[in-house]
Image: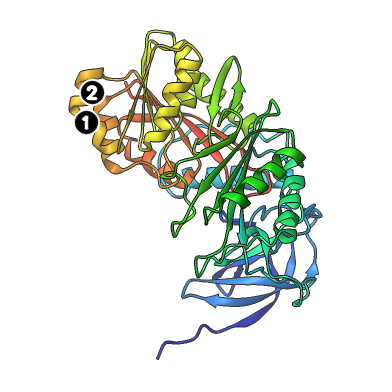
Amino acid sequence: MAKKNKQYTIENLVIENAGSDGRSVARHNDMVVFVENAVPGDVVDAFVYRKKRRFAEARATVFHKYSDDRTEPVCTHFGTCGGCKWQNLKYEKQLEYKFNHVFDCFTRLIKIEIPAIEKIIGSEQQYFYRNKLEYTFSNKKWLTDKDEVHQNNNALGYHIPGRFDKILQIDKCFLQDDLHNQIRTYIYNYAIDNNLSFFDLREQYGFMRTMFFRNTAQGEWMFIMCFYENKEAEIAAFLQAIESKFSQLSTIIYFINDKRNDTIGDLEPVVYKGLGYITEHMENLKFRVNPKSFYQTNPAQAFVLYTITRNFANLQGSELVYDLYTGTGTIANFLAATAKQVIGIEYVNEAIVDAKINSEVNGIDNTLFFAGDMKDILNDEFIATHGKPDVVITDPPRAGMHGDVVNKIIEMRPSKIVYVSCNPATQARDIALMDEFYSVEKIQPVDMFPQTHHIENVVLLVLRN
């Protein structure tokens, strides 16, 4: 018979630090305790709901002392919604703990020589900074204390952490321009008033499934709707109502998604209004963004991030640059004017199509883009055909680079590597593997996601001797 986790309460627990996953950290009897709903400096009673041999997970239930670093969350959903876990922590302290996380990754997790880490660059906008949000329709609303059971059980909002089939009804989200809140509220009421069925995520039935908002700094808006059932009359009436009510929407697109997952990468979009894409501007460049495109969700800080990348690369116009994990080619096209040629490689074929279009739209003719698994494409034949790079830019997913890719970079011996990462831990791990051949010259953290624990980090590596 399996042992049940012992649940108990730790009284007067002093919260000491902020963790890298959004929770806070305390110590009790030489055991690390990860605590939800607390910030460093709080003194709390913590209910332990899960205990392992070396650590425990707990939730703050009683506050004996509030930290001076606390601030009042602006969102009424704070604590229930799984996002924005640091909304109760002053922004200057958020930056401090994010900086500390980068420092710890490069000094405690690995043992290599590094320069002083540059001061973290914060975001001017701490709310309403995102350009993309996704919402889910569900007939199984997550009931909070203020909800009454006899009300309808339909919800349009975000997934409850750990409960894939439960959706928290969102009244207002502070991550994207308020127009999206107005549209979302209208859509929810329209669906209720017209008896449109909300999706059942567990049993896989219903009409209204998911929806997305995307917008640009220039004021263009894209609305993307995913229906589970192809009911032509209901779809036409719904989209016509949205178009009539919100003229701000530059383009309206929908998908029919009857799969068992919410991904749209393999689905065909139907353009109801507009061009099927919106255009983001960065410096003197234009980037087309379609429903499937990847584009940094904080455009203002993306410009900061790419500018740092360009400054670290310090191109003189004669270099061959490899841009690994290029996505839709934003960095590649951003650097092209200062390079002889930029070659971008990306796993997702649709992203490479966008990258080529973005080069064409901007009159850039010194880029090449290739789609496929990085470790398979970046081989001896590829390098012999296109040349050894002078500079490598790499911006991998959170898991970091495959070991074969790290070895191939070392084998190519570029004079510089600019490593952009959303996960300093895997970034530091990869850089440690290259320490014999490359020295770390600069480290620059950038906050892309205020109110969360996430952090971007840019590192310049230079070939030794």
Query: Badge 1: how crowded within 10 Å, few (<14), some, or many (20+)?
Result: few
- Residue at 56% in and 20% down: 286
**Residue 184 coordinates in the image, percent (x, y):** 71, 49
Residue 280 against residue 161 in the figure, above or below = above
In depth, the one of 444 and 348 nearer the eye is 348
- Residue at 52% in and 53% down: 230
Residue 96 against residue 35 in the figure, above or below = above
Give the side of residue 10 with respect to residue 307, left or right. Answer: right
Q: Which residue is mark 2?
A: 383
| Residue 56: mark | none
Mark 1 secondary-structure assignment: loop
**Image quadrant for the N terminus?**
bottom left
| Residue 379: mark | 1
The quarter of the picture where residue 28 lies is bottom right
**Residue 416 coordinates in the image, percent (x, y):** 38, 23
Residue 23: tell me if it is visible. Answer: no
Give the side of residue 165 with respect to residue 313, left or right. Answer: right
Q: Residue furthest bottom?
A: 1
Q: Are marks 2 and 1 in contact (CB under 8 Å)?
A: yes
Type of amino acid under label 2:
Ile
Type of amino acid under label 1:
Asn
In three-dimensional space, the C-alpha distance between marks 2 and 1, rounded to whole angstroms, equals 6 Å
In depth, the one of 84 and 459 nearer the eye is 84
Residue 176: tell me if it is visible. Answer: yes
